[in-house]
Amino acid sequence: MTEPALASEAGAPFYLPTGDEVELFRAAYAGRLPMLLKGPTGCGKTRFVEYMAWEVAKEAAASRPPLVTITCHDDLTSADLVGRHLLSADGTTWSDGPLTTAVRQGSICYLDEVVEARKDTTVVLHALTDHRRILPIERLGTTLAAHPDFLLVVSYNPGYQASTKDLKPSTRQRFVAIEFGYPPPEAEARIIAHESGVRVDVAESLAYLGSRLRRLDEIDVVEGPSTRLLVYAGELVRQGVSPRRACDVALVQATGDDEDVQAAVRGVVEAVFDS
Amino acid sequence: MTGLRGLERSLPLFYRAICGRGCVVVPYDDDAHDRQHPDTATTVRLPSRVDSPTDRWYQVAMAHRAMHTELGTFALRLDGELPEPFFRRLRPLPDDGSQASHLEQFFGHLSRPALALEVFVALEDLRVDAAARRLLPGLRAAYDAARAQALATRPELAGRPPRSGVGEVLVRISLGAEAVTVAGSLVPVVARLAALAAPLGTPEATVESTAEATVRAFGLLARLPNVGEAEGPAREVDLVAVDSGLLEHEDDRLGSTEVRLEGDELFDVRLAPVRYRDTPGPRYLGQSASGMPMREAILRLTPAEPGSGGEAIQQQAQDAESGHVDVSDPSRPAPPPEPLPHDHGPDLGSHHHAAQGVLHAQHRGEFVYPEWDHRADRYLSHWCLVREQHPRPGRGDRLHRETLTRYRHLLPLLTAQLERVAPAGVRRLRRMPYGDDLDFDACLEAMVDLRTGAAPSEAVHAASVRDRRDVAVAFALDLSSSTAERLPVAAGEPARRILDLELEAVSLLMEALERVGDAYGIYGFSGTGREDVRVQVVKEIDEARGIRVLHRLDGLKPHHTTRMGPVVRHLTHRLKQHEAPTKLLVVLSDGRPFDLDYGQQYGEDRVLDYAVADTARSLDEARADGVNPYLLTVDPAGDDYLRRMCGTDWYRVIDDARDLPAALARLYVAARAGSGRAAATAAPGRSSRRTPGRSGAAAAARPA
């Protein structure tokens, strides 16, 4: 927001492509191929989908909401996705779930962290992700054919340690996968500057710091900081917090409670920022 | 004074963050000769204490070293696309058949490799310092303080021969000296030196720029005599306002006008090292024994024996200079105690194990696992062969029956504890016909069904169910030969071995586990080297406890060594195949991990570190795979290494081996209750129970 060059069209989510993901998405969207976005947490997967949904909707000039996002968790049932009957004063009414809504109106449906959902839940996606493009709604006894513009996008964080969950091969085989990583430092600096509104030199230092700390990730000492955390640190700096203190609360504390690791991370922070 | 103590773990992480590579910090106290402590590819040597104006001195020292790696000091290529015009023209072709790195080859191509090395190191340090101060602004103040201190403590210039005097000026330039006073005849040389060093401080400078500057500076220095004193009245030269025009008509040609005077060789240029920087060592010179630089380095790195006779040294120096060193000559100075066998060599770090092969599983019941080499900071793949065997059945189930008789009093309490503690894997089931709560979704659907006229389901409850088999545990019993040790006995008791107590401990627990229904496996481990790690299967996790299991338990025999890493990896692998949500691995041992080839390649004094690091790594892997590993040891010294191996929540040390059965039961109850933190509170540590009589005074001082 400080740099006019980065200002996007009104309402468009800010996204800075770091590879060919925009072209790939467009190509996949043209063929309505279901997509799987793989990558570490906070690297921009969700933002990317928001951006692409906005772009696609702009071109289609349709009035429908461009994107339906569902955050998955292990209590998510297929009724939560497809819909359920609700009680009303004089009987019952059927209420579409978010997936059904997206299928009807032709939005992009984005299932965030799809592995978190139970495996029997994700099975309802199967008929939507092959040539049939249909959604069977068991409770209504009907089958809904997907709107021609409907597209299913799921995200997945393969490095998620605590989870022994993985995608079922029969689910995985239905998606084209785009891999995401953290952006290179120059791009990340621009993202931080744009998102947090912090000065460019601070953003550059934050991006440099982030790329250093991610090296500790390689030996599983700490989870490297995500772009999102770096943006948070930038936000704090913009609000007047000193960079060292901002990094302390946003980055150092996020690395866990091991004192030596914290000391090392703080050492790197204090080497990069002088106040 | 600033000390290294307490920083040994965080400094390597700091280093890794900056340059992306691992290292081990090795402190030294002996400061007699700075050059005795060069870094290697995997080791950073730092003084254990420094008298420094900044408390961040150690970070400065680490940042300098890390930047060497980050900025490619050791990755000089003679055949790359070079931006430097001069060096591009002059550079020799790389000899790809040679084992020497291009950096080492580069020194070899200059007529005095030792001098070339000094010049290169000073110029490269200048480039590295400039980059470190630019890239790490937060460290700049500390960096400048360390540099100022180093500059203030440089040796005197006066009285030095011209060549080493100018060399000293070069080091001062690299430390940011603003001016220097030299004899009049040296003024033009020093001005040129300052001019050619200046571009190395810019962000564009690469290691090739340093190589280019080295060739030029070497030309300047080699032309100066290394004996006598420079002439002319002393004058001050400004090192900051340099005239880059001085370099324009340079006609440097390698060694064209080199001066060699009588006695020159006796006084090689040896520049006093800068304390916070690494001293030139194997990272620069590599291992290739045939190359002259290494030999010369050995000579240079070794302080002359006082009174060993100037002639001999002179001869050696001349020999070194001309490339002849008689390696069998007993008077030849011994190389310094460091570097270690593993880590000299070019800065590659990846080939030193090439000679030893990988292992393959050939038969059923054989498994191959990697090993973590913390010195090299990498896994050795296919390193350990684990062989599963069934122990030869023993005398019968007498052991088990005797154990039950002896510990009968513990059993009811143990079973009750296990039954009371709900294991972590409670499942919440929805849409159950009965349960302790209503399932709201199901109720709603039932209501909807009622109104729409369909028959509603009765399954509208939510229930918490504890599966009988939601815990799977593997017990690993140390069968190393030391478990045959007999314990001191009270009068009238039969002599018992540590192994007997281990067997009693699992025998007792086995009975409790059968009653509460946890799935458990019992394994013994021993070995005679990495290709022979034996896991004795007493009971597989899903195997029913029959009479054969009891016979096998009785048949376990002590046998050689304790290589813990592969055993942890193997049992983790076994547990992973089990569907129970809570998986535990309990290791009973009587001493530190040790095997015949478990770190010995790095010297006997590194064995413990190596074994501890590998075991710690395997425990981390287990946790990452969802297996919670706990260690129980009867080794009184266990605290020392177990603390490094895993957090204090994950192990217990027992003072008296006779406590083992009760301690194992306590540990298991706590471990099963869930996390390691729960283990800490539920099973108080070693101080909780001491048997009087064995550690008399300590026990008496403590309330029972």
Image (spheres, rainbow, N blue to C red):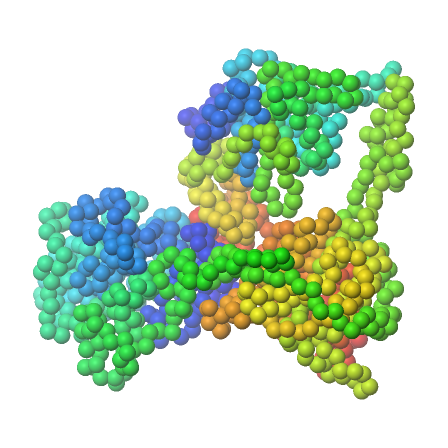
> Who's the residue at 38% across and 47% down the image?
B135
Q: Position of residue A119 (x, y in %)?
A: 70, 35
Q: Position of residue A177 (x, y in %)?
A: 54, 32
Q: Is residue B47 left or right of residue A81?
A: left
> Quarter of the image holding residue B652?
bottom right
> From this viewpoint, is residue B133 visible?
no
Quadrant (top left/top right/bottom left/bottom right) for the N terminus of chain B:
bottom left
B635 vs B107: above or below: below
B591 vs B69: above or below: below
Q: Is residue A186 left or right of residue B697?
A: left
Q: Is residue B128 left or right of residue A120?
A: left
> Quarter of the image holding residue A148?
top right
B86 vs A179: above or below: below
Q: Is residue A95 left or right of residue B533?
A: right
Q: Quick one: B256 or A261, which is closer to the camera?
A: B256
Q: Quick one: B419 or B211, which is closer to the camera?
A: B419
> Who's the residue at 74% across and 69% down the image?
B393
Residue extending farthest bottom: B491
> Who's the residue at 84% across and 30% down the image?
B442
Quadrant (top left/top right/bottom left/bottom right) for the C terminus of chain B:
bottom right
> Who's the residue at 42% across and 60% down the image?
B354
Q: Position of residue B212 (x, y in %)?
A: 21, 51
> From this viewpoint, is residue B560 visible?
yes
Q: Position of residue A178 (x, y in %)?
A: 52, 32
Q: Quick one: A206 or B400, which is closer to the camera?
A: B400
B386 vs B327: above or below: above
- Number of marks in the image? 0
> Quarter of the image holding residue B300?
bottom left
Q: Quick one: B533 or B102, which is closer to the camera?
A: B533
